[in-house]
Image (cartoon, grey):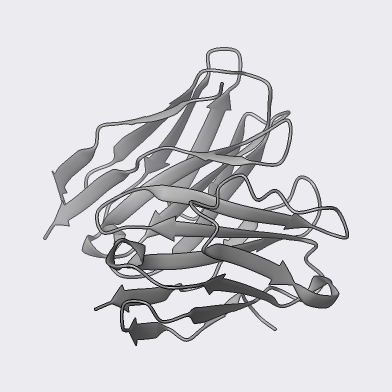
């Protein structure tokens, strides 16, 4: 059974720092992995989607990597800003169609 | 539409009443998911629709919950005889092709008093 883990559960860093969020999964048989952010009381916003055949995807200050063999993905945020404060979730799409979710990392960027 | 639309955005109902939550997926998206998120918790899968296939209802917590998707587009999630533990944010997501992104609506915050 696929399990997705996100570490750390919470992270607080000063504005301007680069940071890495981690997502690990137990079964490498995935279709893709997607990173989302969720602001308090809001829905989820898709950030990046990495297909199983890809190694990384970039969007602006965000870079997501995927190492399927080791069951790991990282989300790198460059030059963090207070507006980046949110909960970041990763979800793995398994061989059926289910999205298997991590519990999220709550990120706080201190001005 | 431009994105996934959910209505109402907020719903307060009395215990024991029935509620209907609506989701308008992105036009052309064949896959539709319903999730529930209780305060401070992760996403709980409820139900999945894919085209004309039979839906995966394995996540529905009780027979008070049901969902339908008419014409492969709009979906409604119905909760009968609501209980206080049903209070949560109900999120809907849609997806196009097999390996494309899932997009979420802003959710319906349900409060049962």
At which x and y percent is residue A2?
55, 24
Residue farthest along the right direction in this orientation: B52
At which x and y percent is residue A60?
49, 55
Residue A15 visible in image: no
Residue at point 40%, 39% (across, down)? A76
Name the one closer to the observer, B24 or B63.
B63
Pick the quarter of the image with the N terminus of chain B. bottom right
Residue at point 19%, 41% (across, down)? A11
Judged left or right of residue B28, residue A78 is left
Above or below — where is A106 with respect to B95? above
Name the one closer to the observer, A94 or B37.
B37
Count of numbered marks: 0
Residue A58 visible in image: yes
Above or below — where is B40 with respect to B64? above
Judged left or right of residue B113, residue B29 is right
What is the quadrant of residue A10 in the picture?
Answer: top left
Judged left or right of residue B99, residue B64 is left
Pick the quarter of the image with the C terminus of chain B. bottom left
Judged left or right of residue A27, residue A54 is right
At which x and y percent is residue B15?
31, 77
Name the one closer to the observer, A79 or B20.
B20
At which x and y percent is residue A95?
73, 30
Name the one closer to the observer, A80 or A88.
A88
């Amino acid at each position: 059974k696929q399990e997705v883990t996100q570490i750390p559960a919470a992270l607080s860093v000063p504005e301007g720092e680069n940071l890495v969020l981690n997502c690990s999964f137990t079964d490498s048989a995935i279709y893709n992995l997607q990173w989302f952010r969720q602001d308090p009381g809001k829905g989820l916003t898709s950030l990046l989607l990495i297909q199983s055949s890809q190694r990384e995807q970039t969007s602006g200050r965000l870079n997501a990597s995927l190492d399927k063999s080791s069951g790991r993905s990282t989300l790198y945020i460059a030059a963090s800003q207070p507006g980046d404060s949110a909960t970041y979730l990763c979800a793995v799409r398994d061989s059926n169609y289910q999205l298997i979710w991590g519990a999220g990392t709550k990120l706080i960027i201190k001005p | 539409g431009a994105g996934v639309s959910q209505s109402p955005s907020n719903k307060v109902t009395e215990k024991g009443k029935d509620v209907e939550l609506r989701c308008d997926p992105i036009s052309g998206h064949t896959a539709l998911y319903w999730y529930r998120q209780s305060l401070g918790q992760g996403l709980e899968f409820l139900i999945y629709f894919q085209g004309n296939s039979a839906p995966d209802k394995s996540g529905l917590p009780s027979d008070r919950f049901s969902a339908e998707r008419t014409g492969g587009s709009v979906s409604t999630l119905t909760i009968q005889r609501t209980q206080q533990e049903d209070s949560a944010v109900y999120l809907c997501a849609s997806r196009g092709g097999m390996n494309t992104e899932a997009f979420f609506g802003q959710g319906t915050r349900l409060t049962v008093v």
